[in-house]
Amino acid sequence: MIVTTTAVLEGQPVQQYLGIVTGEVISGANIVRDIFASVTDIFGGRSGKYEEVLARAREQALAEMCEAARKLGGNAVIGVDIDYEVLGKAGSMLMVSVSGTAVRV
């Protein structure tokens, strides 16, 4: 499955537009990860645990979107947009949503 943020695929013209497809994942943060992240915030640097959660959520949302495109008969998703949102009490959850247009090239 080809996935791109661009509206066209160079050298591969769109044969059929199949519709908008989406994928959403909501991940909760746990107390241990929060403690390590707060220590990282105090001393500076990157929060590897949160980066792992974010990467996993993004990959799952993209996989869900690709599966939706396959069900429509698509072999590519163009114009992909990835959004991140903090939800829940005190920002305890992270939502990753992706959307794009399923096409057959």
Image (cartoon, helix red, strand yellow):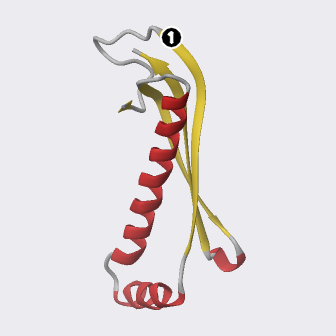
Q: Nearer the viewer, residue 3 or 74?
A: 74
Tag 1: amino acid: Gln
Residue for point 32% across, 12% down: 12
Seen at 37% across and 85% down, the residue is: 40
Q: Is residue 97 above or below residue 70?
A: below
Q: Nearer the viewer, residue 85 or 22?
A: 22
Q: Quadrant of the C terminus?
A: top left
Q: Residue at x 42, y 73 (%)?
A: 50
Identify the secondary structure beneath mark 1.
Answer: strand
Whole-percent x and y of residue 24? 59, 51
* Residue 52 image position (x, y, % from top left): 37, 69
Residue at image coords 52%, 40%: 65
Question: At which x and y percent is residue 60?
Answer: 46, 54
- State the residue in front, 41 or 23: 23
86 left or right, relative to 60: right
Q: Is residue 58 above or below residue 92?
A: above
Q: Quadrant of residue 76?
A: top left
Which residue was labeled with disc 1? 16
Q: Quadrant of residue 77?
A: top left
* Residue 34 shown left or right of residue 12 in the figure: right
Quarter of the picture containing the N terminus is top left
Question: Residue pushed farthest left?
Answer: 11
- Is residue 47 something that shows in the picture? no
For disc 1, the neighbor class at 10 Å (few under 14, some 14 to 19, many from 20) is few
